[in-house]
Image: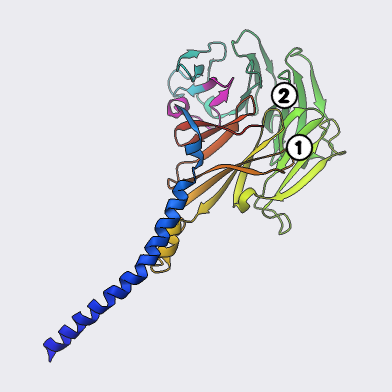
Amino acid sequence: MAIGKDVEVVRSDRRRWPLLVSLLSPIALVGVFLWCLHLSHPGLIEKSRFVFNTAQMRKGRRFYEDIGIQWLSRNEILFCTFDDPVKAASRVARTRNITTGSERELPGLTAAIDADDWEIVDNQCVSPDGRWFVRSGRWDNCLLASIDGSHKHVYPSLATDCYREIFWLSDSRHWIEAFGVNMECKKLVLHDVLAPGVSTSLPVGDQALLLGHLRAVPALSRAISIKLPEEEDTPQTEGKVTITQFDLLHPGSGSRLTTMAIPGAADGCTAHVSPDGTQIAWCAVSPAADPVRSILHKFRSAIDVHPFTQYVVYVSAPDGSGMREIGEVASKDPDDSLEIGWLPDGKSLTVEYGDSMYLVGVGK
């Protein structure tokens, strides 16, 4: 009898196999179809042109990781490396031609740093025409210099307890220091590269929050502020983006306000205004579901449905209208992030992903 029971169990298991195969086959076909559909849609990296590896440009200890690479033109970049502050510490500025790969050091912008100063660099940027360089020290002085170092002027900090943001106007002549704390602007100062000893304070008044979210100043008559969703948002503002275009000389009047959802209904995003202020690039971030894993998860709950972080890049008009997708990246590596920016001509985006820099055209 025992042998007969064993034979019956084997026969029963064999009868289950065709049923299991018949169930899995459609699932597998659907999974393959979805995967092929995903592959047929070129991602952001596939649409982009690789231009250089960024690992060597970001070597050395630094506190503010965003500092390091600025575009002087479509073919030339400026970057800084930081030597170990325990040794003969210096902040070395260099340029590189991305077409030829040739580099040159900029002695006029290279500076010695103290053992602690490596971590107080707050901001650095170049003018839209690639001729001027500004470097600010947190709670300290701010240096304006021509790229070749032939002209220099040092501005003392006017609000020593504040962080400092730098904004170039599109004329490449005027630039603004915005001093603030906790996303509230405390002081605005306008500078002129042709009159470095003369500066003008701009009104803040009751617009500290609006100016605290300042993103670009293409002209004094057209500043752009973008408030992204924050943890302390109310149910009415949660997941909303607010864009304000206004006159920087009269921030409380004549503003054009746009409120919209995060592009692509993502969990979060960053916003980057083009140098001339005519476009905004958005990088939306969300956990991404794998279509094949989503199907398999129904049969085995331990399978992670969201193994990726999905970055989707969009470009819109300055009021958020005309939103169009440029491309997406699904990253499995939690250490890989995607950062975007604009080339000076406002026609292409820079895409830094992992240790690689790419360019992708977006037109105007």
Seen in the picture, residue 54 relative to 260 is either above or below; the reply is above
Name which residue lies at 71% across and 28% down.
276
Residue denoted by label 2: 170
Identify the amino acid type marked 1: Leu
Name which residue lies at 83% across and 36% down.
251
- Quadrant where the image shows the N terminus: bottom left
Depth check: 258 or 45 in front? 45
In the rendered image, residue 76 lying in the magenta stretch gets the answer: yes
Identify the amino acid type marked 2: Ser
Describe residue 128's horizontal placement relative to residue 78 as left or right: right
Seen in the picture, residue 132 relative to 351 is either above or below; the reply is above
Depth check: 32 or 173 in front? 32
Depth check: 281 or 116 in front? 281
Q: Secondary structure at mark 2?
A: loop
Residue 156, picture quadrant: top right
Q: Position of residue 93 (x, y in %)?
A: 52, 18
Label 1 CA crowd tier, 10 Å (few <14, some 14–19, many 20+) = many
Numbered mark located on residue 74 in the image: none
- Quadrant where the image shows the C terminus: top right
Residue denoted by label 1: 211
Q: Secondary structure at mark 1?
A: helix
Q: Position of residue 2 (x, y in %)?
A: 13, 89
Describe residue 58's horizontal placement relative to residue 237 as left or right: left
User: Which is nearer the N-term, disc 2 or disc 1?
Assistant: 2
The range drawn in magenta is 53-79
